[in-house]
Image (cartoon, rainbow, N blue to C red):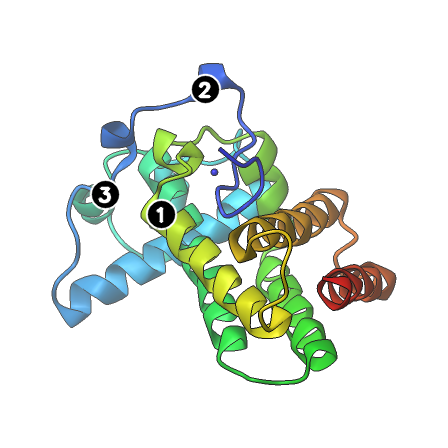
Amino acid sequence: MSKVFTFSLQGADLSTRIPKAKAAMRKEPSQSRSKATVEAIIEAATRILSVEGWAGFNTNKVAEAAGVSIGSLYQYFPSKLSLVEAIRRRHIEDCLGVMKRAGKSGRPLAQFVADLVRDLIAVHSLHPGLHRVLLDDAPSADAFRDPHDAFEVDYLASYTAVVRHYRQGKTGSSDEAVAMTLSDAIDGVIHNAARRGTLQNPEVGAELVRLVTSYLAAE
């Protein structure tokens, strides 16, 4: 998901890459009912992938858990790979939302960092087993490895805006370079903690807060 961690959730070997066209949704829902169906499918797929891993993940299980027919599932998702892409996209959107909300806060640096780390850990804790599967087992579409992907650009732009605010015109490295370093550090710590099952260890959050606060303060 280019960067190994930042908002790409990549972890698959290069041999497992799949063309984006084969992983994309078949169609986007337009009506309230169809949107609800897609939401139910993605949520069910997320639960199953988190608990059973890539080896136990298939479209029949997802359809049954979502309470829809397999035909209804295939209306939107042509394969289990397209379901994985949708899960990744949903997670990316959640993380991007956290970053954008945090960037509008105007809070003192220490409070901003504490809230940001808390909320990002919360997002990654919704389905504890999910990130190990996404990072290490499930194939990923090429879009998640593209440093120019729209989500990646938007994510780093949000970090850059925050860095610019808290650096207050300091010279030296560019705001963009500091933002990229910061985003890689945060994502790396959180994703590896998710892999190890240590996200709920308060020391992990506390040390990440200390790392980010010290870095921005020193800058």
* Amino acid residing under circle 3: Met
* Amino acid residing under circle 2: Thr
| Mark 3 nearby-residue class (10 Å; few <14, some 14–19, many ≥20) | many
Give the mark nearest the N terminus, 2 or 1. Answer: 2
| Front residue (pair 148, 194) | 148
Q: Quadrant of the C terminus?
A: bottom right
Q: Which SS class for mark 2?
A: helix
Residue 38, image quadrant? bottom left
Circles 2 and 1, Cβ within 8 Å, touching? The answer is no
Tell me residue 2's x, y (percent): 48, 33
Residue position marked by numbered label 2 in the rendering: 16
Q: CA distance from mark 2 to mark 1?
A: 17 Å
Residue at 41% across, 59% down: 93
Residue at 37% across, 41% down: 85
Q: Which SS class for mark 1?
A: helix
Residue position marked by numbered label 1 in the rendering: 86
Circles 3 and 1, Cβ within 8 Å, touching? The answer is yes
Residue 52 visible, this orientation: yes
| Mark 1 nearby-residue class (10 Å; few <14, some 14–19, many ≥20) | many
Tell me residue 204's x, y (percent): 82, 58
